[in-house]
Image (cartoon, helix red, strand yellow):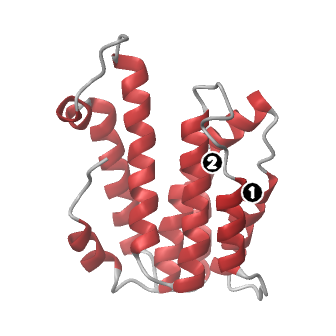
Amino acid sequence: MPGPNDQELRDVLNPLSAAQRLALMLLLCERMMPGLQAFADQTGFDAAHYKTCVASAWAKLAGEKCDADYAALAEDCLARAPDTEDFDSPLVSPALNAALSIAAMMTFIAEGNTDPILQAMELDRDTTALRIQIVESTRPRSLDLKHVLAHPLMQQKRQQQADDLAFVLALPADGAEMIRLPRQRAATFAV
């Protein structure tokens, strides 16, 4: 799903500390995690690896010593991701997007560049676009891109991402508040 200009986002993200960028990734992934969990609950899919990866990222943000091979964790996330061909569930695509976003977060930790953040933001918007298509479309008709982008749910998603980015921009570059405030914000997503 097209989003803000990637170069403009890179220009905003690149000056941030690694901790601030990781906090943004955690917010994105935590917001998508309930979709993965709902899919797991419905189908019996094992989401434990993804929960472990998210917990590992929180530990990394907290500055805990961790010997994890984040590149290998990213590969495992990709290998374990639910295949849309294997499940007949409307929840599979949002679950896949969450799994891919967590893989992107592991890649971000391993490599440190902003491309995985942009990928996770796009996957988050794609999940919203899927929801819009389900809610607003009557088969065999589907909404065109213009209508999806203008839909109130997509506008809400864009605002949510902008709010998360503003939140992260306002965080201190490191320290106790860098950990406490994102955890506090993420705790509201499960509601």
Write the residue at 50% across / 84% down: 112
**Crowd rating for badge 1 (residues with CA inside 10 Å; few <14, some 14–19, many 20+):** some
Amino acid, disc 2:
Met
Mark nearer the N terminus (1 vs 2): 2
Cβ–Cβ below 8 Å for labels 1 and 2?
yes
Residue placed under numbered mark 2 in the picture: 33
Q: Could you say which disc has been placed on residue 39 in the image?
A: none
Horizontal arrangement in the rendering, residue 15 relative to residue 87 (left or right): left
164 and 147: which is toward the camera: 147
Instruction: Give the position of the C terminus as an image quadrant.
Output: top right
Quadrant for residue 17, please give it: bottom left
Give the SS element for disc 1.
helix
Is residue 121 in sight in this rendering? yes
Classify mark 2: helix, strand or loop.
helix
Where residue 37 appears, as percent x and y from the top left, is 71, 40
Residue 149: give x, y in percent of width and height.
23, 38
**Left or right relative to 89: residue 128:** left
Q: Amino acid at mark 1?
A: Lys
Residue on which the image places disc 1: 51
